[in-house]
Every structure is written in C-alpha cells, then in structure tokens.
Image (cartoon, rainbow, N blue to C red):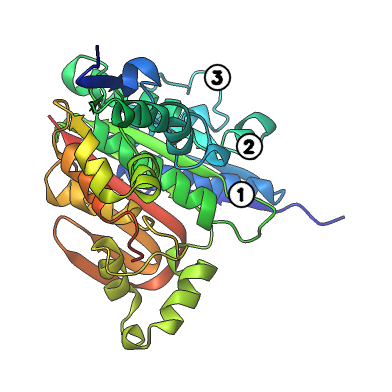
Amino acid sequence: MAKRRNVIVNLSNVESMTPDAIAGLLAAIHRCKSTGAHVKGNVPRSAAPKKMLNESGFRNYVHSRVGAREHAEMGRIARFTRSSEAFNNRFDQFLATDLIQFANQRLRGQALPHQPSYSVFSEAMLNTWNHASRSEDSREPWWASVYVDEDRHCACFTFLDRGVGIFGSHNLTLKLSLLSNLRVLNSAQLLKQIFKGEIPSTTREAGRGNGIPGMYAHCRAGRIKNLTIISNHANGNAESETYVVLPKEFVGTLLYWEIGL
Amino acid sequence: MIASRLDLSIAKEFTEFPGPRKRTEGEFSGEQFLAELLRPRFVAARDAGASLFVELDGAAGYPTSFLEEAFGGLAREFGVEEVRRVLEIHCADEPYLVDQIWKYVDEATTRK
C-alpha cells in the first residue's frame, strides 16, 4: 500500500492575491487529495489576501475548524466533477448563470444576466469537455469562480482546468505540425493567433473554431475586460495585447476576465 | 390568409438558457433548437411566402457554438441565399449578436 503523503499549503507569508489564484489553489489542493495525499494549510497573515480568501467561497471546499468558517460574501466557486450526476450533464448553463447573477447582484444590486460572460463560460466548458482530457475515456474536471472586487468595482471570473492545455491538445498539435509556416512561432505567438481566429479549427468541420476568437471579440469590443488565457507555456492578455512565454509550464488552462459597473 | 411574417422567440418558445452545440454535449443545444423549432418554422415561413422573425431577447446569453450550429446549420441545409431571403433576426439586448449570426450564415459552408 502506497504511503500517504502530507502536503502543507503555507499561505502565511502571502502579501497579495488575485482571484484567479484561489481557483488555481483549489484545483491544486483537490488534485493532491485525489492522489491520496493529506492536505493541510493556513491563511495569509496579511489582511487583504486573508479577506479575499475567506470571502471568496474557498472555505466551502476545504475543511475549516469551527469558528474559522466565514460566509462567502463576495465570491462564489463551483466545481464540475466526475460525479455521476454532473458527468452526464456536460454543459452547465445554470451554473454559469448562477455565478453571473451573483456578480451582478453584488455589483449592481440586481441579479441580472451578462450575455458575454455567459458565452465565455459556455465556450470554456465545451473546450474543457472536448479537448482537455488526457484520455478518450475520461473528462477533465473544471473550476469556475467569481469574486467581486469592491475596491476596483468589478467582478473577476475564473475558469480553470488542469488538463492537457491548449497546446497539449492532440488535434491542435497535429494541426500546427502541418502548418509549416507556423513552426517558427512560439506558444505565446500561437496563442495570439488563436485569439484572432488565425488558427484553423481542429475539427475540420465548417463553422467550427469560433470559441476563443469569440471571447477575444467580446474583449476588444469592451464587453468584457482583461481577458487572459494561461495555458502550457503561453500567457496572453487580449486587452493589452501582450503575449509572453512562461518560464515554467502551467498544467492546464486558466481563463480570466472581468466585468465592471 | 397567408401570414407575411412568422415569429419565433427563443427565450419564450425554447429556453432562456441556450446550451451547447450538440445534444450530446448538454441540454438546450443548438442542434435541438434547429431540429425542433428553427427548421420547421423556417420551412413553414418559406412555403407560405412569409418571412421568419427570430427574436433573441430575454435569454441569459448565447454560446457561439449554439448560434453557429442553429443558424449556420440552417444555411448549410437550405443555402445562404434562401436563409437571407426568409430570415429576420432581432436582438435589442445585445445588438451585436445579429451581425454575429449573419456571419455564421455567410460562412456556414466555409472551412477555416
């Protein structure tokens, strides 16, 4: 029998935190747990990241000692798992709607829809469902979250999976290898081309390949802000049009965007 | 009397929560909408010499895959010209969606 490992998540010295990091942290913790590891941790001593962590909905997914649990005032986190019920429902528009309405309730005082965010969530779920898994037989779980940043008057959405990533997708890799003129491009430059719809669809079917370019169009039109994708070695921001190669690989795909007042 | 216009409200007649592209991917898909509402209503309008006025308002949002499968799928079946002749699209909530749909119709048979 394999020896169980202990993992300590020490956040005590964290001075600043962004909302996307919370979803990433939860995904990492649950990945550790899924291997049988025993995970323990603490919260930042610094007030701002501690407040964000406690109000984000993070504590709904970890065990907290009695008295340390706090109501998630500003955030909400949802997880798609391999459980039987969720597994059969590949696309969960109601979950997306719940997060969006939560954000608008906090931002505007009304649980209004936000159609561009609904569209981004939808395409993210489908991309994860169809492309993120390492095998044909299983599907990759994902995390979706929203955190309302009172100081910046915006809602911050994150969608995350720990799958193969955009550049680990077998079909895309195959496609890129056939495009000899793109061979000289690094992953950041390729991400820029994916944003702009310049990489052909991997399905070879008419009408496909509109998902990420559609998100990019929402951002360029100002319907969402600060759209960011981090996947494998690429980090791209559609608003600032900055695309960089990461020194260390990010396993999976993280999608982040904001809506303001 | 022949109606000069048939109406179809996605939110009122299908769902306020449009889903993915294919039925196999989840509920209220573009494929389902095309099969159960859009195609029959389009054929009825065309055969009656009427237009089909599709109303998008009132929904939580529209995945691009849903719209492409439904409206691009219609154009793949009946041709771009016929779809452009019969279909009218309205969306006051998110007016850019109208152009987006026409783009899917125009590019319905184009492989990227």
Q: How far apart in space, not on screen, are marks 3 and 2 (Cα)?
A: 32 Å
Q: Position of residue A209 (x, y in %)?
A: 36, 58
Q: Is residue A153 left or right of residue B74?
A: left
User: B95 above or below B80?
Assistant: above
Say which quadrant the N terminus of chain A sits in. Answer: bottom right
Q: Secondary structure at mark 1?
A: loop
Residue name at image x 25 percent, y 32 percent: A115
Residue lying at the far top in this picture: please name it. Answer: B1
User: A231 above or below A84?
Assistant: below
Instruction: Read off the chain for label 2.
Output: A
| Count of numbered circles on the image | 3
Please tell me in which quadrant of the rendered image residue B112 appears.
Answer: bottom left
Sequence-wise, which precedes: disc 3 or disc 2? Answer: 3
* Amino acid marked by disc 2: Phe
Q: Position of residue A14 (x, y in %)?
A: 35, 48
Residue bearing mark 2: A87
Sequence-wise, which precedes: disc 3 or disc 1? Answer: 3
Instruction: Read off the chain for label 1.
Output: A
Instruction: Read off the chain for label 3.
Output: A
Q: Secondary structure at mark 3?
A: loop
Residue bearing mark 3: A66
Is any part of residue B103 visible from this angle?
yes
Q: How far apart in space, not on screen, are marks 1 and 2 (Cα)?
A: 8 Å
Q: Position of residue A16 (x, y in %)?
A: 28, 47
Residue lying at the far front in this picture: please name it. Answer: B1
Badge 1 vs badge 2, beta-carbon distance below 8 Å: yes
Please tell me in which quadrant of the rendered image residue A3 appears.
Answer: bottom right
Quick check: do tags 3 and 2 share a chain?
A: yes
